Amino acid sequence: MVIKPHRTKHLMTVGFTMAVIAIISMVFSIATNVELRTQKVVTRTVIQTKEVVWTTDQERIQLFIDELLTSKSAACFREILKRETNGYNPNAVNSDTGASGIGQLLDETYRTIGLKKTGDPLAQVVASLAHIARRFGGSNSVCNAWHYWQLHNSY
């Protein structure tokens, strides 16, 4: 490789600058190591716990919905569930359609969303939300489902 004479001065300047940066980095690193070795490290972990007492499935469901959804989506979802099971009953069964649980989902709906039918109220809420997301999609899917429910008495 041949270096042109006018580039030599430039390369020497770049090389010198890089050497200075390397030396500064080493000095900083050594100073940091010395400082870390001379200081005592105190670690303190604070764990905040919340004690929640759930007395009913409905209270558990309400808290779960509040944690999962925005206030607007939560309000829409509560309207759907209130009308589907009249009180968040995980054992509710529609004798005409066979739909069951809090969200009144059909066995076919559980298969479509890839979940197993369950008696667990919170799992039923998750299944209902999965069904809504799949069917109505988008950022406003829960309220779209509520709007649809108002027109068709189902979602």
Image: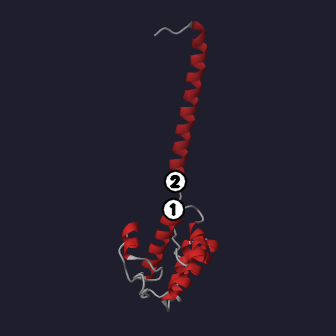
Q: Residue at x 52, y 55 (%)?
A: 38
Residue 122: which quarter of the image? bottom left
* Count of numbered marks: 2
Residue 25: which quarter of the image? top right
Q: Which mark is residue 41?
A: 1
Q: Is residue 110 left or right of residue 74?
A: left
Q: Residue at x 49, y 8 (%)?
A: 2
Q: Are marks 1 and 2 in contact (CB under 8 Å)?
A: yes
Residue 46 in the image: x percent, y percent? 53, 73
| Three-letter residue code for mark 1 | Val
Q: Earlier in the sequence, mark 1 or mark 2?
A: 2
User: What secondary structure is found at the residue carrying circle 2?
Assistant: helix
Which residue is under mark 2? 36
Does residue 42 appear in the picture of this structure? no
Residue 114 in the image: x percent, y percent? 37, 67
Q: Residue at x 46, y 10 (%)?
A: 1
